[in-house]
Amino acid sequence: MCGRFALTASPEEVREILGLMELEGFPARYNIAPTQPILVVVAGPPTEPGSNRPDRLAVLVRWGLIPSWVKDPAEFTLLINARSETAIEKASFRAAMRHRRILVPTSGFYEWHRPSKESGEKPQAYWIRPRQGGVVCFAGLMETYMSKDGAELDTGCILTVGANKTIGAIHDRMPVVIAPEDFTRWLDCRSGEPRDVVDLMKPAQEDLFEAIPVSDLVNKVANVGPELQVPVVPRALLQKPVAAKPDDGQMSLF
């Protein structure tokens, strides 16, 4: 599951890692939420030999995929994530997996550890970022929805996979991360089938991310500043009782 993420890197950093020729400036975003516009990268149109036309383009889409066959978006469940294990066959994602794979640049994402109901504890938020900093790219899917009045809306979602051990201690799912050396293969929907990129939809390496406990500020979409990523003491440790020192039976003068 990926319900919130951030993109705080500079446009120059994003442009460099994705090999984009052009990228308009944008502000740092610390709390990107569903239904908001997100920056994604798609494969450019076919190029001719010697052409200077870019083979990757940055576009904005609404986070929450709407398949082209949906009649009334108001009655359709918001698809912010797609399970990578079933995306090739599932009707909502099948066409996008074949024709419209995208990359979602990010500085990290948020996840919540939810204790059992019996414990009575509240969920603990975590800011999960690349251990070495920088930008990573999630695998995503895109669909252009056309309303009855002919208006077009580009929409997208993030693919998820079973979590690795690092993230699994917090949540059982995590976004699919595409390594830079695999950007071209993931985006290439012209020369290959979806089955040719199945091997890319796997949990990230254990040492890629670090999880930092943060406050509940991230729970509110209206909170959008860097304070969302300030580390805190995990709630479980704050509530943990301090063990009493053993009594050795001797009297103390102090």
Image (spheres, helix red, strand yellow):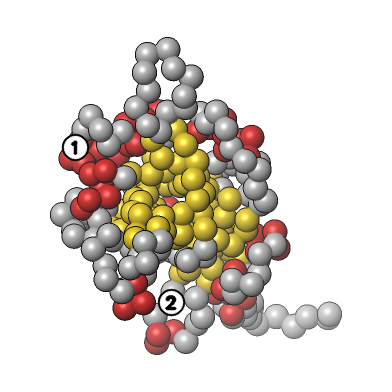
Considering every residue shown, the one lying at the far front of the view is 149
Number of residue marks:
2
Residue 237 versus residue 207: which sits nearer the camera? 207
Residue ID at (38%, 35%): 43
Point 37% across, 23% down: residue: 47
Can you tell which quarter of the image residue 219 is in?
bottom right
Mark 1 or 2, nearer chain start: 2
Q: At numbered mark 2, what does the secondary structure look like: helix, strand or loop?
A: loop
Residue carrying label 2: 115
Left or right of residue 177: residue 92: left
| Residue under label 1 | 193
Q: Residue at x 42, y 12 (%)?
A: 50
Quadrant containing the N terminus in the rendered view: bottom left
Secondary structure of the residue carrying tag 1 is: loop
Q: Is residue 51 left or right of residue 27?
A: left
Query: Which residue ends up furthest to the left in the rendered image?
Result: 89
Please give the label number shown on residue 177. none
Q: Amino acid at mark 2?
A: Pro
Q: Relative to 106, does residue 237 appear above or below in the rendering? A: below
Residue closest to the eye, 22 or 206: 22
Q: Is residue 235 visible?
A: yes
- Is the C terminus in the top left, top right, bottom left or bottom right quadrant? bottom right
Query: How far across and down, in percent of the image, does residue 233 sit?
Result: 64, 67
Mark yes or no: residue 209 visible: no
Residue 37 place in picture, x, y as percent: 52, 58
Tell me the mark number nearer the camera, choosing from 1 and 2. Answer: 1
How far from the left and from the top, in percent, is residue 129? 54, 50
Q: Residue 216 occupies which quadrant of the picture?
A: bottom right
